[in-house]
Amino acid sequence: MVELRRHPRFKVAVDICVYSRDCPVVRGHTVDISQSGISAMLREEVPVGEVVRLEFTLPLGNVEVLAMIRQRNAFRYGLHFVEASSAQDVIGRTCRQLATAQSAPGREDNP
């Protein structure tokens, strides 16, 4: 099966805070990231379709960005970034760095 994605995803595991209109802060950790979104394991339920504020720290800097909850499978959420901000620069540079690090020969877990 071919995965049709606009941007490749890269494994990254960092703490994340999700700020929703209707919930207190939801904490979790990331699974992977691309230039257009991030997936995370969250400890509390957040409604699909809601726009939330995310805060997390990547190796190249702190990120604060708005994202829409696009999908949920148990405690794993897929979030799509919905704003162009200075955070996109940090995300883009991190993805390029992860692409280099995770593209070592023999790596088959890089989509």
Image (spheres, helix red, strand yellow):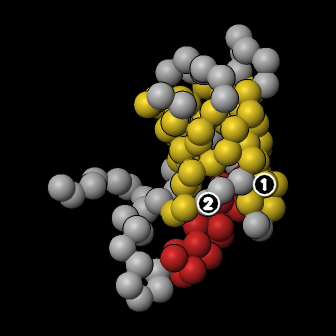
Q: In the drawing, does residue 30 fall left or right of residue 3?
A: right
Q: Residue at x 79, y 18 (%)?
A: 24
Q: Residue at x 79, y 25 (%)?
A: 25
Snapshot quadrant of residue 3: bottom left
Q: Return the residue at label 1.
A: 57
Q: In the drawing, does residue 108 fall left or right of residue 26?
A: left
Snapshot quadrant of residue 105: bottom left
Label 1 close to label 2 by CB (< 8 Å): no
Snapshot quadrant of residue 43: top right
Question: In this rendering, is residue 21 above or below 104?
Answer: above
| Secondary structure of residue under mark 1 | strand
Q: Residue at x 78, y 54 (%)?
A: 57
Is residue 108 among the parts visible in the rendering?
yes
Disc 1 residue type (three-letter): Thr
Q: Which mark is residue 12?
A: 2
Disc 2 residue type (three-letter): Val
**Closer-to-camera residue (8/32):** 32
